[in-house]
Image (cartoon, helix red, strand yellow):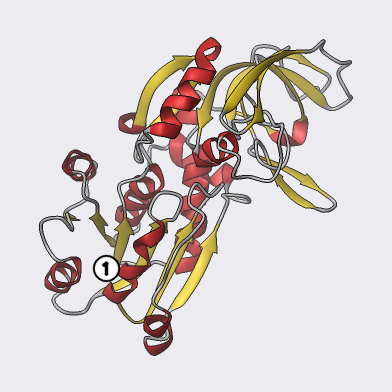
Amino acid sequence: MRSWIVSKPGELTSAVAEDAALPQDAARVRLARAAIGASDIAAFEGKTGKLPVIPCRIAMGLVGESNDITLKIGQRVMLSPYRHTEKGTLVKGVDCDGYLSDFVTCPQSEIYVMPEGISDESIIFVEDIARAVNALEKLDISKTQYILLSGCTVLNFIVAQLAIYYQAIPIVVDRRREMLELAEDMGVYFTVDPGEEDVFDKVKELTSGAMCDCLVVDADFFPDAGRLLSCLKTGGKAAFCGTGSLSTKASAPIAEIVSKHLEVFGVQTGDGELETAINMLATEIVKVDKLIGRLDEFKDAPEVFARIASDPIPGIKSVIRF
């Protein structure tokens, strides 16, 4: 087994280990695709607690060897971003080793057999979809409500699709014209560029003065988005979502939260909704093909991580191909 390990901040080193004996109720999976997310870059930059660590919290591949009768050789599977223990839930690539290896051994509980019709690249968006589902459940989104999305990120593109599916009305805020155009191409009717117009005034215009019911902030990329709380109506709700915290500081207008009786939630993972997310991909409730970035080779991982750390592109998923 060959792996890439974050040995110290800013450095990926190669490691080779012999495959251990396969435990009962486990399988050895040959990796095909792995995603590089915010928590992986945070680990690469030394912003998470555990080093050394193998990054990449979610991946897919083919079963190569199995001691579990429910898993067959050659089956296409997704590997869970989480490991559940007696002490709590561990996040792969953050609290324990992730999937930047050519082969991995996983217990059956961390393996999901994938249905036909979902591309290899699409599978690695499952956790993003599950996190979006968790956020919308906390916000209790309903038909005709306005939901403000801070930033054209992978998470918010998925939230926008789910909002439209639930017949709510997303409004996306971002300064990147090309990403706003992508949002419009994915069915979002209302977009706002704060570099060209005042967000509060535009939201007031779009909602006929009612303002937004909900706000979703991808806090890994837009930690200062707390200012958008001013665009919520009294009694509104806000979900601040993050994974591994690329950003370490954020601010929010406490007086606004108190005076408007706002409810503010934190959403870190998609735990509990992975199977729901897989079904949404299979039934095309959520489409992610336009969110797939370049495919980089496993052998080039050190250069890939350095490139993404220096120039992240929120809204596009970086993929490692094995």
Residue drawn at x 58%, y 43% as measured from the top left: 274
Q: Quadrant of residue 106?
A: top right
**Quadrant location, the C terminus:** top right
Is residue 140 at all visible to an observer of this figure? no
Give how far across and how far down residue 264 sits, in percent.
48, 72
Residue drawn at x 89%, y 15% as measured from the top left: 21
Give how far across and how far down residue 306 sits, in percent.
47, 26
Q: Considering only vertical position in the picture, is 315 above or below 114?
A: below
Give how far across and how far down residue 167 sits, in percent.
29, 60
In the visual, does 155 lie left or right of 127?
A: left
In the visual, does 79 lie left or right of 168?
A: right
**Residue occupying the far bottom of the picture:** 259
Q: Considering only vertical position in the picture, is 172 above or below 108?
A: below
Q: Quadrant of residue 7?
A: top right
| Amino acid type, label 1 | Thr
Front residue of 252/215: it is 252
Give how far across and how far down residue 58 sits, in percent.
58, 33
Is residue 1 at all visible to an observer of this figure? yes
Front residue of 68/321: it is 321
In the visual, does 200 lie left or right of 216?
A: left
Dot 1 alpha-carbon crowd within 10 angstroms: few under 14, some 14 to 19, many 20 or more: some
**Quadrant location, the N terminus:** top right
Badge count: 1
Q: Considering only vertical position in the picture, is 287 above or below 146?
A: above
Front residue of 90/106: it is 90
In the visual, does 272 lie left or right of 96?
A: left
Residue drawn at x 42%, y 18% as measured from the top left: 295
Would you name the residue on which mark 1 appears? 144
Q: Secondary structure at mark 1?
A: loop
Residue drawn at x 69%, y 46% as measured from the top left: 49
